[in-house]
Amino acid sequence: MKSMTSQKAPEEIQQDLKGLDRVFIVGCGTCTTMTRTGGIDEVVEMKERLQGLGKLVTGWTVIPTACDDMTEVAMKENKQAISNAACILSMSCALGIHRMSLYINKPIIPALDTLFIAVEDSPGYFREACVQCGQCLLGETAGICPITACHKGLVNGPCGGTNNGKCEVDKEKDCAWTLIYQRLKEQDRLDLMRKYQPPRNHHVVLKPRAVRIQVRG
Amino acid sequence: MVSRFKDALNSGKFVITSEVAPPKGTNLAKMLHHIDLLKDRVDGINITDHQSSVMRFPSIGGCLAVKERGGEPILQMTCRDRNRLALQAELLLAYTRGIQNILCLTGDAVPIGDHKEAKGVFDLDSLQLLKTIRQMASGEDLGGNKLDGAVEFCAGAIVTPEAKPIEPQLIKFEKKVEAGAEFFQTQAIYDLENFSKFMKHARQFPTKILAGIVLLSSARMAKYMTENVPGIFVPEALIDELASVPKEKVLAKGIEIAGRTIAALKKDSVCDGVHIMAIGKEEVVPDILAAAGL
């Protein structure tokens, strides 16, 4: 599982850093390293770009996993360079920013947009596999998620926009329901596709979503 | 009171419906003209609902105009722009204003239209909307709450007989029949042999099928639809036929093709009727009917 990100346009980052001339850059050693949006190479590149714009980069780090508790350690280790900066430029996903903001009371500016939770099907091909809807249907759809893989999130079969197994929004995208049909047919389980699926509950966990579990003493 | 359109469906006659598109803006003149042109010639007039995800005057507004002018409206409702509260509310409004026929559609995807960044809703799908109508007819809303005054609609849906692969569409078709679809207006059909095969299957089910007739206005348009519109396949022979006539006669050729297709469907009782979509050329629908001998 990867948190998929893309770098914001240089102009947008420049605009967001207006008036913030001393910058500390944080990358992430997990997802944004694998997706090549915020690993060491990209952080160093960003450092050089900011310096080219006349910014003072007070330091940089790549936290092994920016969304877990190692972030606190990294923040402490870089305390001096961070305190010399007017802001942090984050090259982790949004989860890393949330973690950092627990420990740092300075503006944290995202250099990346967080897109979706991805699986890497083949090297370099990241696909959204789950939208975390809270009502898993995979057992009835041969392991292909119609909520995620169908543009409209339909649960009762294909719409009329499908053509030769492709989707109306993009001829490169597969129609999820054609895939589900083919796989259910192979499994001799097409009866599952004939079953009426009622309207979905969009509040399985009430938004804002959070769950508290018992922590073992 | 049973709707006039439902009466026509049950009468055993060859049923004719057509569609009118509302304007983008407040100038209703063209839409009203098209309604006037069709209202006494067809058994029902569909008013499209932001077709192709392009924002327009609402379907229900067009249906009210059909009603005011003495026609029989079929309200197209997509699930793209409204959640289940808004859809149910509109059904209540439609019923109280004498609109008795609903065509339930999932709706085209938002990014193919002219507000590409809008949120697509799809809280319900076409099947769930059909079920909603049946539940509301029983005096209850989707939340299980009692309605003070129920609805009664003749509800239908669409099917794409030329879809490839066809089996997933047929499964959904059967689910729609089970959910209470009393009629189907199909996506455009041109290959009568293929359509007859579909009808052989569809005839097993207790519902009425109106074959979709989309006017071909040029060889280029026919080719474009085959290549780009999901579920539309215009046979090469028809494209050649359109290409064989001079430019000024190509519309007349399209009318002739539509007319003879309708006549053939009627003659052999292939289906229960037709749904004529002239797409911007509503003016010629009476000519298509004449060409069909209707």
Image (tube, coloured by chain):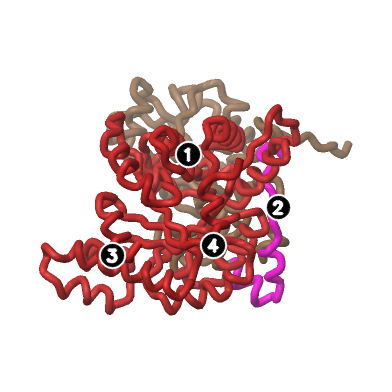
Chain colours: A brown, B red
Q: Are marks 3 and 4 on the same chain?
A: yes
Secondary element at tag 3: helix
**3 or 1: tag closer to the N-terminus:** 1
Q: Position of residue A148 (x, y in %)?
A: 57, 53
Q: CA distance from mark 2 to mark 4?
A: 46 Å
- What type is the residue that disc 4 sits on? Gly
How many residues crowd mark 2 within 10 Å: few (<14), some (14–19), many (20+)?
A: few
- What type is the residue that disc 1 sits on? Lys
Nearest the eye: A212 or A40: A212
Q: Quadrant of the C terminus of chain B?
A: bottom left
Q: Quadrant of residue B123?
A: top right
- What type is the residue that disc 2 sits on? Cys
Please give the residue where the numbered disc 4 appears in the rendered image. Answer: B12
**1 or 4: tag closer to the N-terminus:** 4
Mark closer to the observer (2, 1): 1
Please give the residue where the numbered disc 3 appears in the rendered image. Answer: B291
Q: CA distance from mark 3 to mark 4?
A: 22 Å
Q: Quadrant of the N terminus of chain B?
A: top right
Please give the residue where the numbered disc 2 appears in the rendered image. Answer: A136
Secondary element at tag 1: loop
Q: Which residues are magenta?
A: A180-205
Please give the residue where the numbered disc 1 appears in the rendered image. Answer: B119
Q: Position of residue B62 (x, y in %)?
A: 40, 37
Q: Is residue B36 left or right of residue B242?
A: right
How many residues crowd mark 3 within 10 Å: few (<14), some (14–19), many (20+)?
A: some
A68 shown above or below B7:
above
Q: CA distance from mark 2 to mark 1?
A: 23 Å
Residue at 52% x, 31% y: name it: B97
User: Label 4 marks which chain's residue?
Assistant: B
